[in-house]
Image (cartoon, helix red, strand yellow):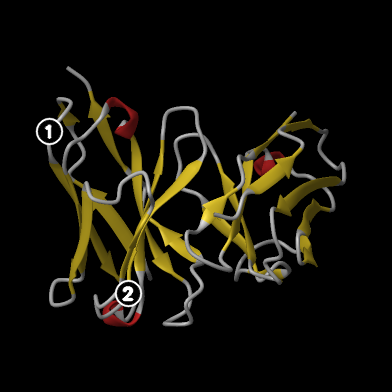
Amino acid sequence: DIQMTQSPSSLSAFVGDRVTITCRASQSISMYLNWYMQKPGKAPKFLIYSASTLQNGVPSRFSGSGSGTDFTLTISSVQFEDFAIYYCQQSYTAPVTFGQGTRLEI
Amino acid sequence: EVQVLESGGDLVQPGGSLRLSCAASGFSFESYAVSWVRQAPGKGLEWLSTITGNGDYRHYADSVRGRFTISRDNSKNTVSLQMNSLRAEDTALYFCAKDQVSGDGHINFDYWGQGTPVTVSS
């Protein structure tokens, strides 16, 4: 199975900060990398697919980059509603696997 | 509008069985794979199983293979997860999620339900 490792596990930021979350795959996954945001008690929300394509309706302050094994999610100017847990997920091959999550907190 | 709604979660004893259901609407149901993903309390997301749109292919995580069975009824726009031989470690919130793209073999979860809770305890 492909292991997905996110860093950091948690991150503190202020509103307006630029933040970057990293996701590393244990083998090359091309650009088959997705990002999700989850708030407490809620379902995950689909943010980015194919490493860098924003899902419809996702604010442009979110961006993704990377290919192969190393990927990043960047929020250019963090807003209050962005404080949540972020997960990466590889869709390159079965079984689908997720990173352990990165908690973005104030 | 795409909607996904899980049901069937409950408190069950170890070794028991439970059947979860996922009802979906707002898209061409038979064209898309549907998956189950769970989240243990305070933990991350774990993919469990996927069934293709026509039901021909089913995939399972090692942790549930042989105990859980996924199925779908395209006439009712529902997907089910039959869970047998339940263990304490199966305690989690169980989500149903739709695949973003029809039939390309790469699973992106674009719509999720709110989850149904399963507790395995005596």
Q: Which residue is mark 2?
A: B52
For numbered disc 1, what is the local secondary structure? loop
* Horizontal side of residue B86 vs B53, given as left or right: left
Task: Identify the amino acid type marked 1.
Answer: Gly
Q: Quadrant of residue A34?
A: bottom right
Q: Is residue B79 above or below residue A77?
A: below
Residue B35 image point, x, y percent: 36, 61
Q: Quadrant of residue B23?
A: bottom left
Out of B7 and A72, give the one closest to the viewer: A72
* Horizontal side of residue A27 vs A43, given as left or right: right
Residue A82 image point, x, y percent: 68, 44
The N terminus of chain B - image quarter: bottom left
* Horizontal side of residue B104 vs A27, given as left or right: left
Q: Chain of mark 2?
A: B
Q: Chain of mark 1?
A: B
Whether residue A62 is visible to the viewer of this picture, yes or no, is no
Q: Earlier in the sequence, mark 2 or mark 1?
A: 1
Q: Which residue is mark 1?
A: B16
Mark 2 burial class by Cα count in 10 Å: few <14, some 14-19, many 20+: many
Residue A72 image point, x, y percent: 79, 55
The residue located at (77%, 36%) in the rendering is A8
The residue located at (76%, 62%) in the rendering is A64
The C terminus of chain B - image quarter: top left
Q: Which residue is at the far top?
A: B122
Task: Identify the amino acid type marked 2.
Answer: Thr
